[in-house]
Image (tube, rainbow, N blue to C red):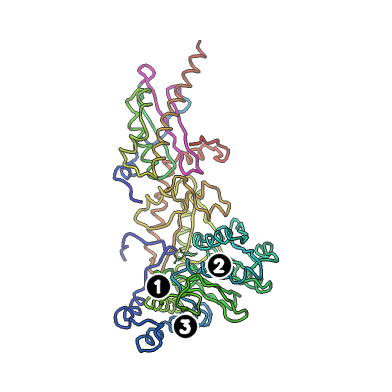
Amino acid sequence: MSIKFPIYLDHNATTPMDERVLEAMMPYFCEKFGNSASRNHAFGWEAEKAVDLAREQVADLIGADAKEIIWTSGSTESNNLAIKGAAYMYGARKGKHIITAEHEHKATLDPCKRLEKEGYEVTYLDPPLDGVITAEMVKDAIREDTVLVSLMWANNEIGTINEIPEIGKLCKDKDIIFHTDATQMVGKLPINVEEAGVDLLSASGHKFYGPKGVGCLYVRRRRPRVRLTAIIDGGGHERGMRSGTINVTGVVGMGAAAALCKAEMSDDAIRLGNLRNKLESTITSQLDGVAINGALDKRIPHTSNISFAWVEGESLMMAIKEIAVSSGSACTSASLEPSYVLKSLGIGDDLAHSSLRFGLGRRTTEEEIEYTAKKVVEGVKKLRDLSPLYEMHLEGIDLSTVEWADH
Amino acid sequence: MAYSEKVVDHYENPRNVGSLDKASDAVGTGVVGAPECGDVMKLQIQVDQATGKITDAKFKTFGCGSAIASSSLATEWVKGKTVDEALGIKNTDIVNELSLPPVKIHCSVLAEDAIRSAIADYKKKHAEAATATA
Ligand SMILES: Cc1ncc(COP(=O)(O)O)c(C=O)c1O
């Protein structure tokens, strides 16, 4: 099979929508266009029926009840609703302390930052080198006044999986609301909100082959019944937690995507895990000075984040320009900040500047992975020939002892 | 980010990659930048001591495509110039030649610094040599 260029290996950023999802959505644009909130005619009922089916499909994927799914515009909104909504609802009564972690997505960190300005206190757990937050770490941070713990299920940059069921149990024991941003986990590996003791869970349709601009927040209804202060007020849709006419086509697509994942994710996970391992072993067997970031055995199977010593990430992306990946470092701002996620793990700035994230997906082929590994190895070798740091390394100079001139 | 054609050309066919003998009297070496800032440039010049002209220049750069292109261009430009003429190369000349966007201007600044630093190293060697023989 011939390779179609460019090769897409950025599935953590977004996934291509599955054609079967598009098919499911099509009737709801022009033909079955009703507003699912229209209670008194067939157009509304038809739309509501479709939305209810999607609710069941998404609920089924995460082990929830359909009534516990609140539609949103995506995980950014779901995280905002979960974090601010729980803090506002329970903050006054229970306390104003929140626990999260430094390597969370901005869609979690920024709502927490806003709450800090409003008088809440936030503990940002400092992740260990392997990136995995354990129940033990959370336990040590819990206080009398802790009202909410928000920790992602799988990390979007390095793919590591936190100890969610253990943390869920801990929070349950301590009567603390537990939110998890499962954007990178849903549809990739089987999860169950009951078994994991999750109270609130964010998901986004476009991360699992559904459409963009639609997501959901799972809100637990029993043991305990979680209540949230709405962020968007209006017509009182979604049990009053999220007003606004439902994006029926988007929701139908997200439901269809969830049903496909439920059926196919186990096979996908095995296939993509093997391809990911092949990518990593091909690269590490041909290059020295390569570090795979994050706990190797606690990762979602389709994600690999690799640092290449002595070369810079953006120039490496140029060397493999027919392959779409994401670079941890973005040399696009004057400050040249490397990825805050990698920095939070405590890996050196030099390695944080030279990392690539490979995100495999449903359509990724073995040929694409072989080609990618070959191109990466060639690119790194070329850039090392150009690199004064590599030259110094070969001369036996310890780069950490060099005094660099400021600029 | 889309790179200009000239940046891509220098990136794909970098000019004057390599190293000169940094212990040699005729060679000036400049190393600027820092790994944690995402770029390090090493630029070296070889000077004909009779004429004061730069006869050869080499570079190695750790950095983005624009940093590589800026230093590659700098080696092309200093060759054939006298040391003092080379000091006249301004980062804005590099920006214009390579059509660097605002976020990449620091790459050109670094290349100018690298030229100055290599020349300063060369001059320092000769000031020392002058005092040593005096
Ligand atoms: C972990 C995580 N949380 C939240 C988001 C935000 O999702 P969306 O852009 O769909 O709102 C993303 C996507 O980048 C993500 O990876």
The kind of residue on which mark 3 rests is Glu
Q: Residue at x 41, y 49 (%)?
A: A316
What main secondary structure does the magenta stretch of the protein show? strand
The kind of residue on which mark 1 rests is Gly
Q: Is mark 1 within 8 Å of ligand 1?
A: no
Counting residues from the start of the chain, the first of labels 3 and 2 encountered is 3
Span highlighted in magenta in the image: B24-52
Q: Which SS class for mark 2?
A: helix
Q: Residue at x 48, y 41 (%)?
A: A390
Disc 1 residue crowd, few under 14, some 14–19, many 20+, Cα 10 Å: many
Q: Residue at x 37, y 30 (%)?
A: B57
Label 2 – label 1 distance at C-alpha: 24 Å
Q: Is A49 located above or below residue A128 in the figure?
A: below
Q: Is A13 located above or below residue A288 in the figure?
A: below
Q: Which SS class for mark 3?
A: helix
Residue A56 in magenta stretch: no
Residue A191 at x, y = what percent? Answer: 54, 75
**Residue indicated by mark 1:** A210
The kind of residue on which mark 2 rests is Ile
